[in-house]
Image (spheres, helix red, strand yellow):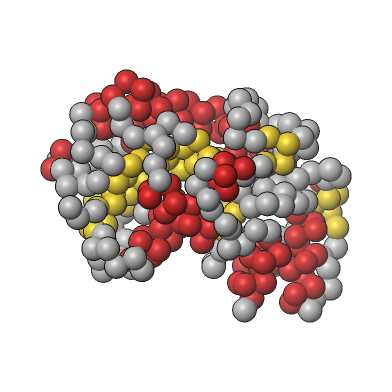
């Protein structure tokens, strides 16, 4: 039987997964959604328009030959999770789906004042965005518990990779070295996101959640100093967080402080990260 992946949201991580699956040469087919007609569509991907105010038309037909689903559509205050808002009933009817992945965030753990959380830690969001994510997770898990849709949750740290993250922002002059003592962030290279998702595809465990982060939570100033050193640049001047003009998104970012473990992707899925820390990740981007 041919395998077909449908992505609700053909974004950065979904496109990386598609690239990895192409390399398997297993006859994978691909389809997914975009808010508008893409400027540079991928040749082998079937596109469908979908947005908060415009559900998929003919969804039964569109998903009739789909075997795997990845969803990364972000929830919002207007409709919550847009996929569940428009298509919960349609998804509940599906009986032929082998795997569903929902890309969530470590924001569901909220602020832990720098303490560690792991895959067994109960979510406790402290921001509106975190609460929206947790509500979306619960909606997808309801499809698993009530309708046996094989849903898996992936709680992602801060994503970086080609064209995205501190290296790009630093080169473009769009980043400041904000100092907040004791502040940690967990990160993940986009290639390792795809690597974990592929491991889950081959070893599904419906209803499970996975923290998708690397092995070394680190303060952002430490990461920026490392990148400057790789580039042969002087370190950025420090900016105390109390003097920083932060956007609303960045205020949320800095209001939550935790270190996230990734035990389950290693012990259950057997994943060995290609980029176990930010050091290997940013060095590879420069090469």
Q: Residue at x 72, y 49 (%)?
A: 217
The spot of residue 215 in percent (x, y) is 68, 52
Q: How many marks?
A: 0
Q: Quadrant of the C terminus?
A: bottom right
The spot of residue 208 in percent (x, y) is 47, 34
Which of 29 and 172 lies nearest the eye of the viewer? 29
- Can residue 281 be seen by looking at this rendering? yes
Reply above or below: 273 against 141: below
The spot of residue 120 in percent (x, y) is 60, 30
Which of 153 and 71 lies nearest the eye of the viewer? 153
Relative side of 114 to 81, left or right? right
Which of 118 and 9 lies nearest the eye of the viewer? 118
The spot of residue 153 in percent (x, y) is 46, 37
Reply above or below: 108 against 165: above
Q: Residue at x 62, y 62 (%)?
A: 275
- Can residue 246 be seen by looking at this rendering? no
Residue 285, by quadrant, is: bottom right
Residue 230, by quadrant, is: bottom right
Relative side of 64 to 220, left or right? left
Relative side of 218 to 153, left or right? right
Q: Residue at x 40, y 63 (%)?
A: 20
């Amino acid at each position: 039987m041919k395998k077909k992946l449908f992505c609700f949201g053909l974004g950065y991580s979904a496109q990386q997964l598609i690239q990895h699956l192409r390399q398997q040469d297993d006859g994978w087919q691909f389809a997914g959604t975009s808010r508008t007609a893409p400027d540079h569509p991928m040749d082998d991907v079937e596109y469908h328009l979908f947005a908060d105010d415009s559900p998929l038309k003919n969804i039964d037909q569109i998903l009739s030959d789909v075997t795997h689903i990845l969803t990364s559509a972000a929830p919002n205050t207007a409709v919550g999770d847009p996929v569940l808002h428009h298509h919960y009933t349609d998804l509940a009817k599906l009986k032929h789906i082998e795997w569903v992945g929902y890309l969530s965030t470590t924001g569901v753990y909220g602020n832990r004042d720098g303490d560690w959380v792991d895959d067994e830690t109960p979510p406790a969001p402290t921001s509106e965005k975190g609460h929206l994510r947790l509500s979306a997770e619960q909606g997808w898990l309801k499809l698993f518990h009530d309708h046996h849709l094989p849903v898996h949750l992936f709680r992602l740290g801060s994503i970086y990779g080609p064209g995205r993250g501190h290296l790009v922002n630093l080169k473009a002059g769009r980043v400041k070295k904000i100092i907040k003592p004791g502040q940690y962030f967990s990160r993940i290279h986009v290639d390792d996101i795809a690597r974990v998702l592929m491991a889950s595809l081959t070893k599904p465990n419906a209803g499970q959640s996975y923290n998708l982060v690397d092995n070394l939570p680190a303060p952002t100033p430490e990461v920026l100093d490392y990148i400057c050193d790789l580039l042969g640049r002087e370190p950025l001047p420090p900016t105390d967080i109390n003097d920083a003009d932060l956007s609303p998104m960045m205020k949320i970012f800095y209001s939550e402080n935790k270190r996230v473990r990734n035990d389950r992707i290693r012990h259950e899925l057997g994943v060995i990260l290609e980029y176990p820390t930010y050091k290997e990740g940013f060095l590879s981007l420069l090469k």
